[in-house]
Image (tube, rainbow, N blue to C red):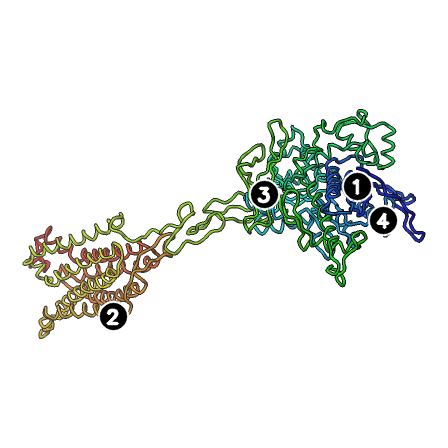
């Protein structure tokens, strides 16, 4: 293999710009393929005097052996193509490869040097006319590719980048001749979004290079991930000026943040100082998602065995591994004596074998490369064997970017093959013409580049889409510690943009190792998920992922996110995580309150029956015969009916029970009060109509008594019937009266009927009270008018107090109040009217005589 520098030809006398010099490795050929690689780091330049010529190249002395292998991959690919008689017969490819030093000014000089065909060049001049420039392979970083694409696109020179991934480069209007064998960051950002979604992370930090590559990738990721409800804990720029003060600011943000997952869009040269600072600050327990730019290079630069705890569990995206047959042997055969004019091989030799060349050789290297060398450790002899070095440089088991370089060179070669295979009269250009195979215009080759397609050495089909991009395929790797304490890359999944929607990503979770060797997926949330029965309340001034957990209100449930009202017949359980049927409440026979009311109802019935027995036994005594025993018995039976009616209010309501409540209440009390009314009328007539010829009492016979009672009761029955027909009663499920319960009750129309019936009963009671009050002072020791007056006073007191209590109570207590009113008013009538008589009959029999009735008993 021979390396030569192009012969410099003087520029035309009309050139105005000064000549510039670019360092590179060149080989003549019929067609030249340019290449740019970052073989050295960039150096900071400050205080450049304007009085001196700007002839410096901003390159450090640190040599990058990884990118040098990329460059050798390009040279190897060109040599293989030249040896292939079927691909470009009768055509020899040459190359012109330059070092960008990771900075734009140097890269622009390289671009002009490639276009000019000379190491010493004047912009806009093509000085080497015996060969055509086909295309340029490069650059690595997106910012440098943008700068070069702006120049190369002006002339329509095809440019194929092997490592630039910024989505902006897909814009064909801005970069019409740009292609790349590296997937766009549009896909890389989407893969990170899928990973965040897959592992359920909700609180993520972002780090990105403070250049367009980092900013655009971070923005795409942020937009996509926020649509999933994920919050960004912080988004910090990684300084590219290597300022430790700025690195400390970023590290402090990471330290203060609770985010356990950090996505970093960066290249190795920019993120290495930040990672070193993280080690110094002892920041652990973080899961890193590494972009392709540093996912496989970080361990080569910074990770020592004692620092593996900081990076174990890192997940990264890489290009799929590939096999370039013959590349390793090609690297083994490299030797500085075989390529004396290759300015980079001596530096490679020093890196691989940790040696230094003699002072004379060093001076020659300095003159050629203008790159300062470090102090020698031991003298290089040139007899070192690359095969015996056992260095990562010759390890071809981890090729990724080198495959991109290889594919870029082959894409140019196949496009040239298609250009040379053009048949006259069938060409794609004007009038069917074809391009000159050895003297073509760059835009003519560009036509074929857009349509090129080939099978690479791994057997995969390669082609460019309408944006000059390739299909995105990534391996997902996991940084794991081996038994000897070093980091290794373990493939745990992959991403293929060509797969059906929803199936693009596959992950083998069983192969994953996380922080400190943990097997459980780390959590990264601003606030832990709320437990069922509580809801999220976003903290003021914080993203939606930062929230407090607030208990749901009664009757609501939640799954930990929002509270939902239970259906009408349901209520929330104690934990408020599910709806359960509401407790149905009514005044039951089986509860203590119901038992007490039943007891008093039975007691009232028992006392009434006992009084009836007493009256039957002493029916011929004056006190009974003198108080119209027929009305007394009917009154007692009506009171028994009242006590029985109270039992209808206890138990589960039904339509039949609602009807019985209204009719039973109205009829029983109407019958009771009608008897009292007739008794009162009899008393008034007996003691007021005493003058001669007044025979009204004689005409007011028992038949008339029965007619009045029947008429009063019949009126009440008609009222009840009319109300029931106008508004039929029904059972209502009252869910509003008592929280969390369903109250079974008769509907409001039944209540209106109840008050209508009660109004009629009230009129009867008022009439009885007026008559009894007027007759209260009439003679006779056992004047019933007095007792009737007292009983009606109790009756009014009960039912007047019933109204406010009724309207202020809910549920079964409302029914209990109704029963209490019925029982208390019935007991009041029973006690005031019949207890005095029983007292005389049983305890004061001497008063139960005609003389005693007249007040003359001894």
Please state which of the two labelled residues, at mark 1 or mark 4, is closer to the viewer: 4
Numbered label attached to residue 581: none
Q: Is residue 180 above or below residue 312?
A: below
Circle 3 crowding by C-alpha within 10 Å: few under 14, some 14–19, many from 20: many
Measuring 62% from the left and 31% from the top, which residue is drawn there? 309
Q: What residue did someone put label 1 on? A: 99
Q: Nearer the viewer, mark 2 or mark 1?
A: 1
Where residue 130 is drawn, which disc sits there? 4
Mark sitting earlier along the chain (2/1): 1
Proximity of marks 1 and 3: CB atoms separated by less than 8 Å: no
**798 left or right, relative to 523:** left
Looking at the image, is mark 1 or mark 3 earlier in the sequence? Answer: 1
Instruction: Name the residue tied to disc 2.
Output: 722
- First reached walking from the N terminus: tag 2 or tag 3: 3
* Residue 184 appears in the picture as rendered: no
Quadrant containing the C terminus is bottom left
Asked if residue 64 lies left or right of residue 723, the reply is: right
Q: CA distance from mark 4 to mark 3?
A: 47 Å
């Amino acid at each position: 293999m021979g390396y030569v520098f192009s012969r410099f030809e003087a520029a035309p006398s009309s050139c105005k710009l000064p000549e510039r010099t670019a360092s590179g490795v060149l080989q003549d050929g019929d067609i030249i393929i340019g290449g740019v690689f970052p073989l050295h780091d960039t150096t900071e330049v400050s205080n450049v005097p304007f009085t001196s010529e700007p002839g410096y190249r901003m390159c450090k002395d640190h040599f990058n052996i990884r990118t040098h292998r990329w460059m050798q991959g390009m040279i190897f690919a060109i040599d293989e193509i030249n040896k292939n008689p079927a691909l470009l017969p009768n055509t020899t490819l040459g190359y012109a490869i330059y070092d960008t030093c990771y900075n734009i000014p140097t890269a622009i000089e390289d671009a002009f040097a490639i276009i000019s065909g000379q190491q010493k060049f004047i912009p806009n001049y093509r000085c080497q006319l015996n060969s055509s420039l086909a295309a340029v392979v490069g650059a690595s970083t997106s910012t440098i590719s943008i700068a070069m694409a702006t120049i190369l696109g002006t002339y329509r020179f095809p440019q194929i980048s092997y490592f630039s991934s910024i989505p902006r480069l897909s814009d064909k209007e801005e970069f019409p001749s740009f292609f790349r064998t590296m997937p766009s960051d549009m896909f890389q950002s989407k893969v990170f979004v899928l990973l965040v979604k897959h592992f359920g992370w909700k609180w993520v930090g972002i780090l990105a290079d403070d250049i367009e590559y980092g900013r655009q990738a971070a923005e795409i990721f942020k937009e996509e991930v926020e649509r999933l409800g994920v919050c960004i804990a912080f988004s910090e720029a990684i300084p590219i000026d290597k300022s430790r003060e700025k690195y400390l600011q970023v590290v402090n943000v990471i330290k203060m943040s609770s985010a356990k997952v950090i996505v970093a869009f960066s290249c190795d040269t920019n993120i290495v100082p930040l990672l070193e600072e993280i080690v110094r600050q002892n920041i652990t327990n973080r899961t890193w998602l590494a972009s392709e730019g540093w996912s496989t290079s970080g361990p080569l630069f910074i990770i020592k065995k004692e620092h593996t705890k900081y990076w174990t569990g890192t997940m990264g995206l890489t290009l799929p591994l590939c096999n370039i047959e013959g590349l390793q042997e090609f690297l083994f055969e490299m030797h500085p004596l075989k390529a004396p004019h290759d300015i980079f091989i001596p530096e490679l030799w020093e890196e691989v074998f940790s040696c230094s060349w003699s002072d004379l050789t060093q001076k020659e290297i300095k003159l050629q490369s203008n790159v300062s060398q470090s102090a020698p450790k031991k003298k290089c002899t040139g007899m070192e064997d690359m095969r015996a070095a056992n260095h990562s440089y010759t390890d071809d088991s981890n090729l990724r970017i080198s495959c991109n370089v290889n594919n870029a060179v082959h894409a140019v070669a196949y496009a040239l093959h298609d250009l040379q295979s053009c048949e006259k009269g069938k060409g794609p250009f004007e009038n069917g013409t074809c391009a000159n195979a050895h003297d073509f215009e760059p835009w003519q080759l560009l036509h074929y580049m857009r349509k090129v397609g080939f099978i690479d050495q791994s057997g995969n089909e390669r082609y460019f889409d309408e944006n000059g991009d390739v299909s995105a395929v990534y391996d997902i790797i996991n940084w794991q510690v081996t038994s000897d304490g070093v980091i290794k890359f373990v493939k745990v999944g992959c991403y293929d943009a060509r797969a059906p929607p929803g199936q693009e990503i596959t992950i083998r979770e069983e192969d994953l190792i996380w922080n400190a060797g943990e097997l459980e997926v780390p959590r990264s949330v601003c606030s832990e998920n709320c437990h069922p029965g509580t809801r999220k309340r976003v903290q003021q001034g914080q993203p939606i992922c930062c929230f407090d957990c607030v208990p749901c209100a009664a009757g609501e449930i939640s799954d930990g996110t929002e509270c939902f009202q239970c259906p009408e017949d349901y209520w929330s359980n104690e934990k408020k995580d599910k709806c359960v049927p509401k407790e149905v409440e009514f005044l039951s026979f089986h509860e203590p309150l119901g038992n007490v009311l039943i007891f008093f109802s039975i007691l009232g019935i028992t006392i009434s029956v006992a009084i009836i027995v007493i009256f039957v036994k002493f029916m011929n005594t004056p006190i009974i015969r003198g108080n119209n025993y027929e009305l007394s018995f009917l009154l007692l039976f009506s009171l028994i009916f009242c006590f029985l009616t109270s039992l209808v209010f206890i138990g589960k309501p039904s339509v039949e029970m609602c009807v019985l409540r209204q009719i039973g209440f109205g009829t029983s009390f109407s019958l009771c009060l009608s008897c009292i009314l007739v008794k009162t009328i009899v008393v008034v007539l007996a003691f007021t109509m005493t003058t001669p010829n007044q025979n009204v009492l004689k005409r007011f016979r028992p038949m008339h008594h029965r007619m009045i009672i029947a008429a009063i009761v019949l009126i009440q029955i008609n009222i009840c019937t009319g109300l029931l027909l106008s508004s039929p009663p029904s059972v209502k499920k009252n869910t509003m009266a008592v929280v969390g319960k369903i109250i079974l009750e008769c509907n409001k129309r039944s209540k209106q009927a109840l008050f209508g019936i009660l109004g009629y009963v009230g009129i009867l009671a008022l009439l009885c009270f007026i008559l009894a009050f007027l007759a209260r002072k009439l003679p006779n020791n056992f004047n019933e008018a007095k007792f009737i007056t007292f009983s009606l006073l109790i009756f009014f007191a009960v039912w007047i107090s019933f109204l406010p209590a009724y309207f202020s109570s809910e549920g079964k207590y409302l029914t209990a109040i109704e029963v209490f009113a019925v029982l208390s008013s019935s007991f009041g009538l029973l006690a005031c009217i019949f207890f005095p008589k029983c007292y005389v009959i049983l305890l004061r029999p001497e008063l139960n005589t005609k003389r005693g009735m007249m007040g003359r008993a001894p």
